[in-house]
Image (spheres, grey):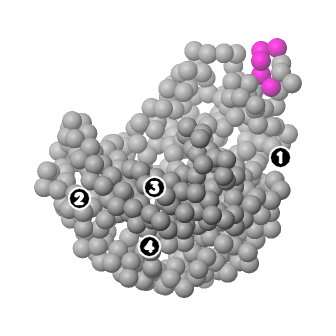
Amino acid sequence: MSSLNGMEPNSYFIRTFGCQMNVHDSEHIAGLLEESGYSRASTPDKAEIIVFNTCSVRQSAEDRVWGNLSALRAGRASPIVAVCGCMAERYGNKIIERSQVVDIVFGLDTLKRLPELIHRSRNGSVCDLGDKNEATLDEVPSVHGRRLSAWVPVSYGCDNCCSFCVVPSVKGKERSRSPDAIIDEIKSLVGNGVIEVTLLGQNVNSYGRDLSPAMSFAEILRSVASVQRIRRVKFETSNPRDLTDDILEVMDQRPEVCEHLHLPVQSGSDRILEAMNRGHDRLYYIEKVRKARETIKDLVISTDIIVGFPGESEQDFRDTLDLVEAVGFDSAFIFKYSPRDGTPAARMKNEVNDQAKSERFLRLSKLQDQKTLQSLRRLLGRNVELMVEGPSRKGDYVVGRTRGNQVVLLPALDADADSLVMAKVQAVGRHAARGDVVEVLHAKCSSRSSGG
Ligand code: SAM
């Protein structure tokens, strides 16, 4: 049903920017709106309510949101526009002033009041962020995008003080969910057909230190892996400082826990690691990787690396190239350093100019592409278990993920989205392999949604 101006009454559209945590939070925004009588708009331009769930980690992410908001101003009859996520926590009311189209700014803590905020916004813009240090989504319903896989946060916020990072200031102090809440949620998900969960935390391995009695990530990981009928357990993001041996042991001992670590290193230079306040040096990192590989067979390691951090010399950058060569990451996300107001690094002298950042980005990407290709080649001719996520960008393939999070493309006609298959890897490209389905291990069940 469409109203005169083309909008579908009581319909919503959510645009999510940034990390998996935001993707997960958006599932709760959808859940809450649907519980309050809204339904997903058939196309974004027909939505009565548009929610932007934003990211502030780099300037480019913020620029995309400002660009989207300007496009709305230039466009059509006005929907209700709401902004949440990192930019909301960072700028609050200023978003309403600057954009001139935003009706609601809300925080993770006030998400549960979103229907009331929508109502209030009909009389003028509202900004209600609540307390980011208290926010959890335990009581908020959610709608899951996929049927066999689900994201499950074990903690919110971050207590690290990496000098480049805006996350602690926008996501608040680290709060661990109770083990009961986590296990109950996972049992409920499994009851609805989920067989793969990814445990989320900004620093997932420091889970449980704030609980009373304290609990370790290794313990919650073991408990999650013990939930009946769960087949794959993944987690991210690991901080090298908190990746303890007992976590590696659980990964080795429990077949449900996948052989993957996302272990950001950020730089290969001791000088830069210190300026980043990462709390470890390069030897510590290399030793951690050695121990992890020694403990876990077929371990796949991905990482994050920042190039052009303030003061990064050519020699510092070569130390990073050297570390990437030595470790042989299976894949890496490479970022150009982006100064974030309010962080210690933004006040540092010796900024690296854009040209040098771009040049280092290209050199490092070229090296990592070779490493990724080498890693994918090791899959050639092997049978691998894949969770099929959905169509590839071009649509002629579907995207499957190995237990190590590597991408294997399958002919679209051979595998359904939301299925677990065994496939034989036939070829490898620069960023993904290509395979053929050998056996369907698990097909999707009926649709579901669950309480928070
Ligand atoms: N909490 C996680 C962690 O510590 O790895 C994720 C943080 S962030 C969402 C993901 C990645 O973005 C970081 O690992 C880092 O490589 C990159 N990043 C964070 N701040 C950045 C900045 N100011 N400029 C460029 N990249 C940045």
Query: With respect to residue 4, does 304 lie above or below?
Result: below
Circle 2 sits in a helix, a strand or a loop, which is it? helix
**Residue drawn where x is 82% and y is 27% of the image:** 9
Q: Is mark 3 within 8 Å of ligand 1?
A: no
Examine the residues drawn in magenta and state their main secondary structure. loop
Alpha-carbon neighbours of circle 1 within 10 Å: few (<14), some, or many (≥20)? some
- Closer to the N terminus: mark 2 or mark 3? 2
Quadrant assignment for the N terminus: top right
Circle 3 sits in a helix, a strand or a loop, which is it? strand
Distance between mark 1 and mark 2 Cα atoms = 49 Å
Q: Are marks 1 and 4 in contact (CB under 8 Å)?
A: no
Q: Which residues are magenta?
A: 4-8
Q: Nearer the viewer, mark 1 or mark 2?
A: 2
| Residue bearing mark 3 | 427
The percent coordinates of residue 426 (x first, y second) are: 49, 58
Residue 299: assigned label: 4
Foreground: 373 or 198?
373
The amino acid at mark 3 is Ala
Can residue 22 be seen by looking at this rendering?
A: yes
Circle 4 sits in a helix, a strand or a loop, which is it? loop
The amino acid at mark 1 is Glu
Q: Is mark 1 within 8 Å of ligand 1?
A: no
Foreground: 155 or 67?
67
| Residue bearing mark 2 | 320
Q: Nearer the viewer, mark 3 or mark 1?
A: 3
The percent coordinates of residue 157 (x first, y second) are: 53, 59
Distance between mark 3 and mark 1 Cα atoms = 45 Å
| Residue bearing mark 1 | 35
The amino acid at mark 2 is Thr
Quadrant assignment for the C terminus: bottom right
